[in-house]
Image: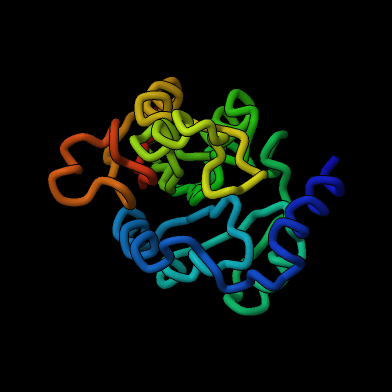
Amino acid sequence: MIKLLQKLYQSHHKNGSRLRQSLLEVERGKLLSRWIGENKKVLDLGCRDGTLTRHFIKNNQVTGADIDIHALKFAKKTYKIDVHQVDLNSSLPFVNEEFDVIVMGEVLEHLPYWGITLPEVKRILKRDGILVGSIPLAYHIQDRVRVLRGKKLLISGDPTHVQFLSYDDFIYKVRAYFDIKDIVVLQGGKGWKSKFPKFFARNIAFCLENI
């Protein structure tokens, strides 16, 4: 299965031609770095080639993990971090309470079985450790108009997305495992729209605490 998934994502990543590309890299990098802080043991799950990871390497012990072994090789060579190939739909190869921080940036929307992944994340995260990352949302105003026009609900045209969550869906799912420390709207909720994230937010960053 892991070889099949690796082949799928290598094709999705266009066999390396999308290296050094990361959605909202600067915005997410600054925000996640602030949440993470320094002198932490950090695991970046779904790190790909390390483009986002590099923003929080300084003064932290960072491990990158992904299904795409070629992207991982690039991350290891370029940013000098430890890397592991993992299947996020199964058990993770780390010991209990190993990390202070786990990062999942634009990853959760690709995972069909949160009931497998999130308990594993919780297991390897220290008590009071944090899970940070970002996720695109569905069912905002633009998506609702899209559906009314008879078009498919497909976020960013990405066929590897299998989770289409509203703002409330996301909160409901993660609260089963973590406390919510902060949520920041990255797309779709600037200015006065920030008061109504349920209707306008298209992408959010989150900081969750292990309980």
Lateral position of residue 7 relative to residue 131, left or right: right
Q: Is residue 144 above or below residue 158?
A: above
Q: Give residue 200's quadrant in the image.
A: top left
Residue 123 visible to the viewer: no
- Residue 24 spot, x, y in % from top left: 41, 62
Which of the two residues, 116 or 112, is positioned nearer the viewer here? 112
Give residue 125's position: percent from left, percent from top. Answer: 49, 39
Residue 70 against residue 203 in the figure, above or below: below
Q: Is residue 169 left or right of residue 182?
A: right
Residue ranking furthest to the front: 149
Residue 169 point in image, percent of width and height: 42, 24
Residue 205 versus residue 33 in the image, above or below: above
Image height of 76 relative to 145, above or below: below
Q: Judge left or right: residue 6 versus residue 142.
A: right
The quadrant holding residue 127 is top left
Depth order, front residue of 179/162 = 162
**Can you see residue 106?**
yes
Tell which of 148 and 69 is nearer to you. Answer: 148
Residue depicted at x 40% and y 41%: 129
Image quadrant occupied by the N terminus: top right
**Residue 159, image x and y in percent?**
66, 44
Q: Is 201 on the left-hand or right-hand side of 8?
A: left
